Image: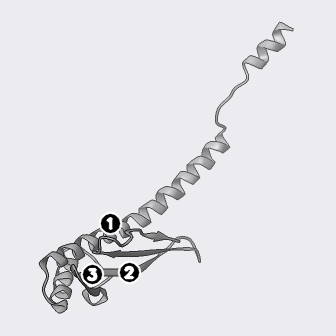
């Protein structure tokens, strides 16, 4: 009886080799996905910074578009151009907004569609949508 109890206590616990492979595969998928999405997020943040600085410089709509294009060249922004920006006159001045999508190919026919939007308006939502 003591010998049977001793065998039960020595039973191994932990992660099996198959479980380890499965977890590593999941981790690899998440790392790959993050590596593909990260550059688009960096570009989105650069666009937001550029439109805020363009708004501070002011000027006509054409001048602001040209200023954005110059900042886009320096900041490696290729998703949108100055002509894609939307300018709205408000009581507090000119508000600048943008919206665009990025499609990232994953595997075969599967792809990831990211919808980005932003504005210089204080009361507008500042969310990026991921679908």
- Inter-mark Cα distance, 3 to 2: 11 Å
Compared to residue 107, the image places residue 101 above or below, namely: below
The residue that disc 2 covers is 99
Work out whether 11 lies above or below 122: above
Check if mark 3's residue and mark 2's residue have beta carbons within 8 Å: no
User: Among all residues in the image, which is located at the extreme right?
Assistant: 1
- Tell me the crowding category of disc 1: few under 14, some 14 to 19, or many 20 or more residues within 10 angstroms, Cα based: few
Image quadrant in which you'd find residue 9: top right
Q: Residue at x 38, y 81 (%)?
A: 99
- What is the CA distance from the residue labelled 3 to the residue labelled 1? 19 Å
What coloring was used for the rendering? one colour
Residue 59 appears in the figure = yes
Q: Nearer the viewer, mark 3 or mark 1?
A: 3
Dot 2 surroundings within 10 Å: few (below 14), some, or many (20 or more)? some
Residue, disc 1: 42
Query: Relative to 79, is 90 on the left or the right?
Result: left
Numbered badge on residue 96: 3
Write down the quadrant of residue 76 in the picture: bottom left
Relative to 102, is 18 on the left or the right? Answer: right
């Amino acid at each position: 009886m003591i010998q049977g109890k001793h065998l039960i206590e020595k039973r191994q616990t932990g992660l099996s080799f198959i479980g380890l492979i499965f977890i590593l595969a999941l981790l690899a998928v998440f790392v790959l996905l993050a590596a593909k999405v990260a550059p688009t997020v960096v570009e989105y943040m650069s666009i937001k910074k550029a439109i805020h600085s363009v708004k501070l410089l002011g000027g006509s709509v054409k001048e602001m578009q040209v200023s954005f294009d110059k900042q886009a060249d320096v900041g490696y922004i290729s998703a949108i151009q100055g002509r894609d920006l939307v300018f709205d006159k408000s009581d507090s001045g000119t508000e600048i907004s943008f919206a665009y999508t990025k499609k990232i190919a994953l595997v075969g026919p599967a792809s990831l569609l990211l919808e980005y939007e932003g504005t210089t308006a204080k009361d507008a939502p500042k969310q990026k949508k991921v679908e």
